[in-house]
Image: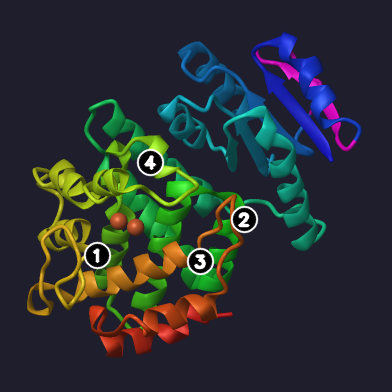
Amino acid sequence: MLVCYLTDEPSKIPAIRALLGPDHHVVPGVLGEKLPFGSDGVLMIDADLRVMARVAQIKETLGDLKTVSEKLFVVQKHLHHMVAQAYALGATSVVRSNREIAPKLAEIEAAAKASGATGGAVRSEIVDCARAFASMFSAINHDQSIDLSEAERATARVVVGIERDGLGSWLDDVRRYHEGTFQHCLLVTGIAVGFALEIGFADLDIKRLGMAATLHDIGKAKIPLSILDKPDRLNPSEDKIMKRHPEIGHELLKDMPEIGADILDGVRHHHEYLDGTGYPDGLQAGHISDLVRLLTISDIFAALIESRPYRPPMPRQDAYNILCDMGGKLEKPLVKAFRNVALVA
Ligand SMILES: [Fe+2]
Ligand SMILES: [Fe+2]
């Protein structure tokens, strides 16, 4: 595969050539200099995103390479906000170490083959939505205010994308191109929108549920990456920290005048169960709204079908069976109605 390697540090080039050859054809370029490549192949960007001048150069370069469909960023593992910065710049994949590059390229190559000769261009809604998530997470990490209009725009694009192409292709595309928290948020929003369309919600209600889904895990921006991206099961103290994200999200949004009470309710209560065994408030059925019930089902299903580096995604039928086995925790008629969403082609 053709790999156009763009770096701010020419001394990294020999190591990348050694790492990827002879399986890939590496064409190196240096940021700020005339590029020896065009829009073909995978663009791999390896630069220090903490330096604003570099970020500006990358933006300019990407402006000239608009038709590149695969943009793989290499960021440093320990810097949480650099991952968000990469997605904000339009990354379609992010790796956190050189070790992860070859497996990721193999994945991209396999996906391109599977989707035919086009090379599997990443649809613009996914890139835009990931960018919106990245920018919200980044704002929170820098104690800046969140731009809700960005979340609204991203949600509206998901609705248009799912109405046009269906939920099945949205789920496949998201799982192919994104990982971790952004993948989860993209999946939940898509599933919630698909659910709302399936049960015939009015446009305004689709938008409300979509926005609640877009924002539901915003509190995770404050959870350390070592917990958020931990490949193994969380230990009890990590689990306790993770379970704070609904309250944190609620806290982050509650004073914003443009946020509706129903969306705040979704952010705070999407881990509540009808039998009172959920968190953070242990609500019983009578206190759990319809919007939250739909969101909870979408959230659990998304978490089950996510693709993770350490395990293959669970088949949708298996994930749906798990929902059906959750007894009194979820509303049975809604789980039944969800069948068409879960098993959509
Ligand atoms: Fe959550
Ligand atoms: Fe979630």
Q: Please state the horizontal and vertical placement of residue 137, each as a whole percent of the image.
A: 34, 37
Q: Say which mark, if any, is on residue 305.
A: 3
Distance from Cα at disc 4 to Cα at disc 3: 20 Å
Residue that appears at 77% across and 23% down: 16
Which secondary structure, mark 4? helix
Q: According to the image, label 1 marks what residue?
A: 208
Residue 35 magenta-highlighted? yes
Q: Please state the horizontal and vertical placement of residue 304, each as a whole percent of the image.
A: 46, 66
Q: Nearer the viewer, residue 94 or 92?
A: 94
Name the amino acid type tagged 2.
Arg
Distance from Cα at disc 2 to Cα at disc 3: 12 Å
Q: Residues within 10 Å of mark 3 (few under 14, many from 20)?
A: many
Q: Is residue 233 above or below residue 283?
A: above
Q: Which residues are magenta?
A: 23-37
Quarter holding residue 23:
top right
Residue 302 visible in the snapshot? yes
Q: Which numbered disc flags the more N-terminal residue, 2 or 1?
A: 2
Q: According to the image, label 4 marks what residue?
A: 227
Q: Residues at badges 2 and 3 in contact (C-beta under 8 Å)?
A: no
Which secondary structure, mark 1? helix
| Camera-side mark, 1 or 4 | 4
Q: Residues at badges 4 and 3 in contact (C-beta under 8 Å)?
A: no
| Camera-side mark, 2 or 1 | 2
Q: According to the image, label 2 marks what residue?
A: 176
Which secondary structure, mark 2? helix
Q: Which numbered disc flags the more N-terminal residue, 4 or 2?
A: 2
Q: Which numbered disc flags the more N-terminal residue, 4 or 3?
A: 4
